[in-house]
Each structure stands twice: as structure tokens, then as C-alpha cells.
Amino acid sequence: MSNRLPLVRTAGELRKTVQGWRKHGEKVALVPTMGALHDGHLSLIKLAKKYADRVVVSVFVNPTQFAPHEDYNSYPRTEEQDWHKLAAGGADAMYAPNVHEVYPGDFATRVEVAGVTQTLEGISRPHFFSGVTTIVAKLFLQCLPDVALFGEKDYQQLLVIKRMVKDLNFPIVIVPGPILREPDGLAMSSRNVYLDARERGLAPQLHAVIKDMAFDLVAEREVEETLAQGVARLESAGFRVDYLEIRDAETLLPLEGIVRQPARVLAAVYLGRVRLIDNVAVLPE
Ligand code: AMP
């Protein structure tokens, strides 16, 4: 790897790098990722540049957000390619710390948000959000950015981070980025590489179904009926549905009848052993 884009390995080095920028009055953005970078990640860097002079991208597969049966060991790790993508994508530093640097043997703290974590992903993946909030709180304190960007692809995660930032008074502005999709509608994800050819052919149906649901809801079809048809369509397309829900866009509380406020259709499905998540906005007139 050449030395054009700094590859930072420790929190101390990161602090020094960021302090150097700040001395010149530059604003700093952080884009946290787990690497295996795709255009969705790169779109967040592009967006970050509208809010800050410098963009740090962290690349860290965070063990505390994986349950023992999940894919921590097999999660795609493509550090060298990631570095090249970040260099081309306009990042100013890649922060890729070692797992022992982030979590020394005597690490004993967990950051936990209640409420908005206790539904959807929080039910299917009980360890997940406290792992996310713990690592994001650490990254915020290590980097001290002005702005941090999170994709709407992980819609509930975005709400959880906003809650944490408000509750713990992090002086950081959270900026959401829209979901980047493949031309056939499949939301870009590092985990899409797990799909075999047949599954990859079916996968875009997830977006097709939830997009139709959002359309129907805006046309005043009732929540209950829209959900029942959505589940039936997903199952007949070959998905196993983990959850399919229509929720208030801010609180994620369930809705009934005709939707009159900003809402979200959120889904998690399995195709074989691969778990896909996606969501779309419902914006009644
Ligand atoms: P990950 O590496 O999957 O943890 O994702 C890092 C960040 O990129 C998170 O804020 C994600 O929501 C965001 N992200 C992942 N996929 C997409 C996508 N298809 N479009 C926009 N943002 C995304």
C-alpha cells in the first residue's frame, strides 16, 4: 500500500491526525463501516464531503455486535481493496484498528440504548445494538468528529445512534444517507457476496415487494391487509420472512389502519442461510 491515504491503526494516531486538521480550522466527518466496501459506503463519503473538509472512514469488523452463531469469522475482509476504494473515493484517512487495540483483554463496558432497540432487529439479534452503540461510542470518542454519517439501509440502527447521541450529549451531527441499490433494486450490502446465483436472481424481489407495499399504503390501503399480502408475496417468491413490519418512521411503533404519518416498511428475510434487510419510506400526502 502506498502512503497517499493514511492507514491509521491506533486511537492515538487517529487523534493526532484529526488534531492536525482541526488546527487549520477544518471540520471532520466520520463514516463507520465494517469494510468490504461497496458503492453504498462510498456514497456516504461523498455526502460527508458536503458537511466536512476531512473524512475519516473506519473499517472494523466489530466482534461485540455478532452473536456466537453469526458470521463474525466469515464476514468478508478485503482491507487492501478497501484502501484503494477509499483512496479513489476521496477519504482522508482509513482507520482500521486491530481488534485487541479496540477491545483489550480487560475491556468491561457496554453502551446500551433502551426503547427503539427493543423491536425488529433487536428481537432477532439481541446482542446486536449494544455491540453497535458500544463501538460507535468508542469511535466517536477516538475520532471526535463534527459529523458522522449512517446509511438508511440500517434504518433502525440510524435511529438508535441518534438516540444515543441525544441521550449522551455527543456534540456530533448525525447525517443519514439514502440506500444505494443495484440496478435491479437489491440494496447494496457487503453480505450480498454470500448469495449464490439462484438466490441473487431472487433477491431483488424483496425491494419490489416492499416498494409496492409503500405505494399501496400511500393509496390508503390498510396496514393489516398490506402486511398480509406482503408476507404472502415474499414467501411465494422463496424468502423465509424473519419480520415484515410497517412502523412509524421516528418511533418504530406499530401502526394500524390507514397510514397518515411518515412511516417505514421494514423487512428482514432469509434466502437460504443469507439474511437480507431492507426498508422503504412511506410518505402519505
Ligand atoms: P456496514 O459496513 O454494513 O456496517 O455499513 C456501514 C455504513 O454504510 C452503515 O451506516 C450502513 O447503513 C451504510 N450502508 C450499508 N449499505 C448501504 C447502502 N446500500 N446504501 C447506503 N448506505 C449503506
Image (cartoon, grey):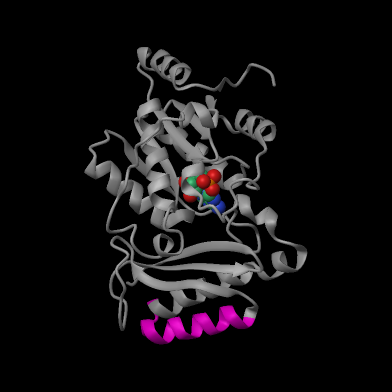
**Numbered marks: total:** 0
**Residue 221 appears in the rendering:** no
Say which quadrant the N terminus sits in.
top right
Residue placed at 28% from the left, 54% from the top?
114
> Is 94 rendered above or below residue 182?
above
- Residue extending furthest right? 197
Residue placed at 47% from the left, 48% from the top?
65
- Determine if the magenta segment contains residue 106: no
Left or right, 254 with respect to 238, comes to: left
> Is 119 rendered above or below residue 32?
below
Q: Image quadrant of residue 269?
A: bottom right
> Is 22 rendered above or below residue 273?
above
| x, y percent for residue 278 | 51, 63
Main secondary structure of the magenta stretch: helix
Residue placed at 30% from the left, 76% from the top?
255
- Residue extending furthest front? 106
| x, y percent for residue 74 | 65, 48
Left or right, 258 with respect to 186, comes to: left
Q: What span is colored magenta in the figure?
A: 218-236
Q: Image quadrant of residue 133?
A: top left
- Determine if the magenta segment contains residue 222: yes
**Residue 167 appears in the rendering:** yes
Q: Image quadrant of residue 39?
A: top right
Left or right, 209 with respect to 117, comes to: right
> Is 7 rendered above or below residue 65?
above
213 vs 275, nearest the viewer:
275
| x, y percent for residue 20 | 42, 13
155 vs 44, nearest the viewer:
155
148 vs 116, nearest the viewer:
116
Say which quadrant the C terminus sits in.
bottom left
| x, y percent for residue 209 | 54, 75
Residue placed at 28% from the left, 42% from the top?
165
